[in-house]
Structure formats: structure tokens, C-alpha cells
Image (spheres, rainbow, N blue to C red):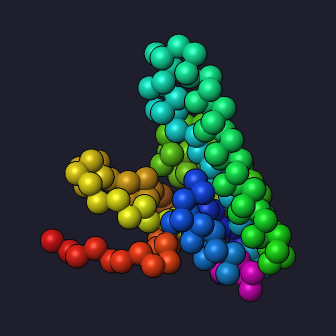
Amino acid sequence: MYDEILVPTDGSGASVAAVEHAISIAKPHDATVHFLHVIDVGTEMSASGLGTIAPELSKSLEQRGNDALDDAVERAESEGVQFERTILEGTPQEAITDYSSDHAVDLIVMGRSGRSGLKERIIGSSTDRVIRSGEAPVLVAHEEGEEAEDSE
């Protein structure tokens, strides 16, 4: 049923939950899990006007991505699950949906950020945007211990 599973990860608790779910799905299906970290160019561009801060921010964002991917890879290796790891720069939801299409992904597993502020309600989270724009089904993983929000 699943041959190619994509997990965008940023190292947050919610994305770690997504990594764990994806690995548990991939293992019995002998599927490959694609771990993807997207360096948000919007963040980099925002810092570009700050002079010397921009290069340091870029290094920091890249290191954060590598750390998140290292953790995901370690989890996959310990379970004997095949994987790919990739870092891309771009707008997260576009990079995720493009990667999904380019690699014939059967399932995307993403973490729920848990944020419920006004900004997220108006423009939506990356997970919401991928759900709306992607062709592959999306499984939304919740961080352990996360309480469900009340519907309004």
C-alpha cells in the first residue's frame, strides 16, 4: 500500500511524532521514508537586510535542519527502515508538495504544530496548506501529551 512516505521534519516534538508514525507505517510495508527539512527562504530573506546576521542565521537554520534529519535517520536505522534525507530551501508547503510529486510519494506524515494564534488561523500552518494543496494523502501526527483544542 505504501512504498514512499514523506516526513517533513524540523525537530519539534510534533515532527518527531510524525517521524515515529512514519517509521511504524513504513516498517511492515518495507517502504522508504523520505525525511525532508525545508529551510524557509522567507526567514532567510527577512534577515538579509540585517547585514552580518544573515550568514549566521543561514548557518543556524542549516544546522537545525541537519540535527532534525540526524535524529530522524537514527530512528529509522534503529528500526531497519530504508530512508532518504534531503534539505531544501524554499517555501515549506511548496517544497513539500513539489518533493511529494517528484518522488511519487504515497503518504505524507506531518506533525501538528499545536499553535492556535491569530496568524495561524488567518493564513494557516504549513500542514494545513499541504493538506489543501498536495495530491498525496496526509496523516497528521500529534505530539504525545498534546491536548486537543476545543472547536469554536
Query: Residue 80 at what x, y percent from top left?
Result: 84, 76
Residue 6 falls in image quadrant: bottom right
Is-magenta flag for residue 8? no
> With respect to residue 61, does 85 lie above or below?
below
Residue 112 falls in image quadrant: bottom left
For this view, does 80 lie left or right of residue 48? right
Image quadrant holding the N terminus, namely bottom right
Query: Residue 31 at what x, y percent from top left?
Result: 74, 74
Q: Residue at x 66, y 38 (%)?
A: 62
> With respect to residue 152, does 95 lie above or below?
above
Q: Is residue 86 visible?
A: yes
Q: Which residue, as the protein is rendered here, is positioned at the far bottom?
A: 28
Q: How many numbered marks have been drawn onto this rendered protein structure? A: 0
Residue in front for this viewpoint, 12 or 77? 12
Q: Is residue 137 visible?
A: no
Q: Residue at x 69, y 75 (%)?
A: 23
For this view, does 46 lie left or right of residue 23? left
Q: Which residue, as the protein is rendered here, is positioned at the far left?
A: 152
Q: Main secondary structure of the magenta part?
A: helix
Image quadrant holding the C terminus, namely bottom left
Q: Residue at x 82, y 74 (%)?
A: 78
- The range drawn in magenta is 25-29
